[in-house]
Image: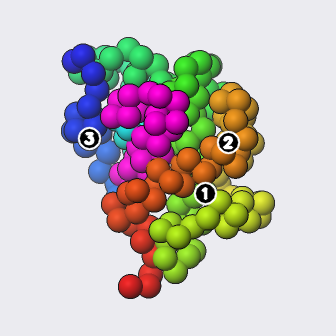
């Protein structure tokens, strides 16, 4: 395959991932990656596809995350740069593949950041639709909020991107807003 498409990534992911919360996470990260691709001048569909596929082996091998990714994806013809980006999001957690390209650094950062954005949006009557950066930052500062999301890792990712957290979060929020319905983040009020 010359290029990983979003459609192809969804098909490949569906062979391993069935849990709704993991599929929703894939969709969140994919949306964020599309917006980050636009920011960095990357190939939007490729970045979205990598975002969708990044946790390919997590459901079946949570204790060995990313150890069962490289060979199967290579056998399916996923381009090397996309495999490397997926592996690099585990840097310092389950491997030592350091994110080097803007796509790799973006995935490393967006993976955890989308979790806090999603949690913050779920607390709002209109979900992410009218969520502001200010509203997100308030939740960010509350260490008890979305406590499982690794804030130091997100900040490390922002540092790698040479960007302020506020700027990265603004891009991610806008990217997720564009997919509010698919991400089930339209809120509770009709």
Residue 16 locus on image (x, y percent)? 29, 40
Q: Is residue 90 magenta?
A: no
Indicate the quadrant containing the C terminus: top left, top right, bottom left or bottom right. Answer: bottom left
Sequence order check: which comes first, mark 2 or mark 1? 1
Residue located at (33% from left, 60% from top): 182
Residue 131 locus on image (x, y percent)? 57, 67
Q: Which mark is residue 154?
A: 2
Q: Which mark is residue 10?
A: 3
Residue 46 locus on image (x, y percent)? 35, 30
The answer to whether the residues at label 1 and label 3 have Cβ atoms under 8 Å apart is no
**SS under mark 2:** helix
**SS under mark 1:** helix
**SS under mark 3:** helix
Q: Quadrant of residue 43?
A: top left
Q: Main secondary structure of the magenta part?
A: helix
- Magenta span covers which residues? 22-47
Res. 89 visible in picture? no
Q: Is residue 36 magenta?
A: yes
Residue of label 1: 116
Depth check: give the residue in front, 136 or 54. Answer: 136
Res. 141 visible in picture? yes
Sequence order check: which comes first, mark 3 or mark 2? 3
Against 46, residue 179 (above or below) is below
Residue located at (61% from left, 57% from top): 116
Residue located at (55% from left, 42% from top): 110
Indicate the quadrant containing the N terminus: top left, top right, bottom left or bottom right. Answer: top left
Q: Which mark is residue 23?
A: none
The answer to whether the residues at label 2 and label 1 have Cβ atoms under 8 Å apart is yes
């Amino acid at each position: 395959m010359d290029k990983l498409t979003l459609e192809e990534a969804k098909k490949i992911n569906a062979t391993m991932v069935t849990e709704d919360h993991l599929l929703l996470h894939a969709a969140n990260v994919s949306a964020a990656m599309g917006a980050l691709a636009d920011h960095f001048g990357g190939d939007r569909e490729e970045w979205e596809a990598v975002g969708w596929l990044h946790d390919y082996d997590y459901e079946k091998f949570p204790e060995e995350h990313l150890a069962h990714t490289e060979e199967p994806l290579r056998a399916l013809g996923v381009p090397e740069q996309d495999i490397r980006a997926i592996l690099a999001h585990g840097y310092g957690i389950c491997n030592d593949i350091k994110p080097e390209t803007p796509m790799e650094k973006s995935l490393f950062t967006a993976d955890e950041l989308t979790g806090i954005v999603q949690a913050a949006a779920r607390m709002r009557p209109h979900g992410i639709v009218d969520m502001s950066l200010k509203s997100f930052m308030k939740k960010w500062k509350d260490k008890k909020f979305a406590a499982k999301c690794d804030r130091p890792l997100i900040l490390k990712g922002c540092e790698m991107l040479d960007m302020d957290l506020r700027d990265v979060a603004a891009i991610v929020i806008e990217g997720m807003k564009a997919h509010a319905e698919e991400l089930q983040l339209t809120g509770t009020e009709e």
